[in-house]
Image (tube, rainbow, N blue to C red):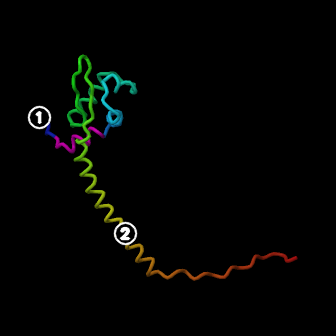
Amino acid sequence: MPAVADPLSTTLAAVADPTRRAILARLRHGDATVLELAAPFSMSVPAISKHLKVLERAGLLTRSRQAQFRPCTLQPQALREVADWIESYRALWEARLDRMEAYLDELQRQTPAPASKPHKKAKGKRA
């Protein structure tokens, strides 16, 4: 039996696929049916449904039933854990870059500017 992935891994795996990211981008503009979501892709509706199931398992969308339609709704709060995780690394890299910038500034202050050399006159005939 395969191990159950943690929610962060499940979400990252779901958004790793460009088709699923395109589906999420479409859902930012409002709910859509499976047929509406499938329209821009050159794949079958069952293939799109598989992508939707992955997104649904990751908590990134929900599907409801309205008569014969099953509209999909974006659940952006599921991306909060991913955003928080990435944010912790952004802060780390900003701190490192700030330290590197300070180090380079200090090196520039310690290094004397090169002395300028007099320009050589161009050789040639004078009129």
Residue assigned mark 2: 100
**Is residue 34 rendered magenta in the image?**
no
Name the residue located 45 percent from the left edge and 77 percent from the top edge. Answer: 108
**Which corner quadrant of the image does residue 126 belong to?**
bottom right
Q: CA distance from mark 2 to mark 1?
A: 47 Å
Residue placed furthest toward the right: 127
Task: Give the position of the C terminus as an image quadrant.
Answer: bottom right
Q: Residue type at mark 2: give it.
A: Met
> Within 10 angstroms of label 2, few (less than 14), some, or many (20 or more) residues?
few
Question: Helix or strand or loop: what does disc 2 sit on?
Answer: helix
Name the residue located 32 percent from the left edge and 61 percent from the top edge. Answer: 93
Image x and y of residue 57, in percent: 20, 34
Image x and y of residue 59, in percent: 21, 37
Going by the image, does 31 lie left or right of 107?
A: left
Q: Nearer the viewer, mark 2 or mark 1?
A: 2
**Which corner quadrant of the image does residue 121 belong to?**
bottom right
Task: Give the position of the N terminus as an image quadrant.
Answer: top left
Name the residue located 30 percent from the left edge and 24 percent from the top edge. Answer: 34
N-terminal label among 2 and 1 = 1
Going by the image, does 122 lie left or right of 52?
A: right
Question: Helix or strand or loop: what does disc 1 sit on?
Answer: loop
> Within 10 angstroms of label 1, few (less than 14), some, or many (20 or more) residues?
few
Magenta span: predominant SS is helix
85 over 95 or under it: above or below: above
**Is residue 10 rendered magenta in the image?**
yes
Image x and y of residue 92, in percent: 28, 61
Magenta span? 5-15
Q: Residue type at mark 1: give it.
A: Met
Residue placed furthest toward the top: 68
Image x and y of residue 61, in percent: 24, 33
Residue 1 - label: 1
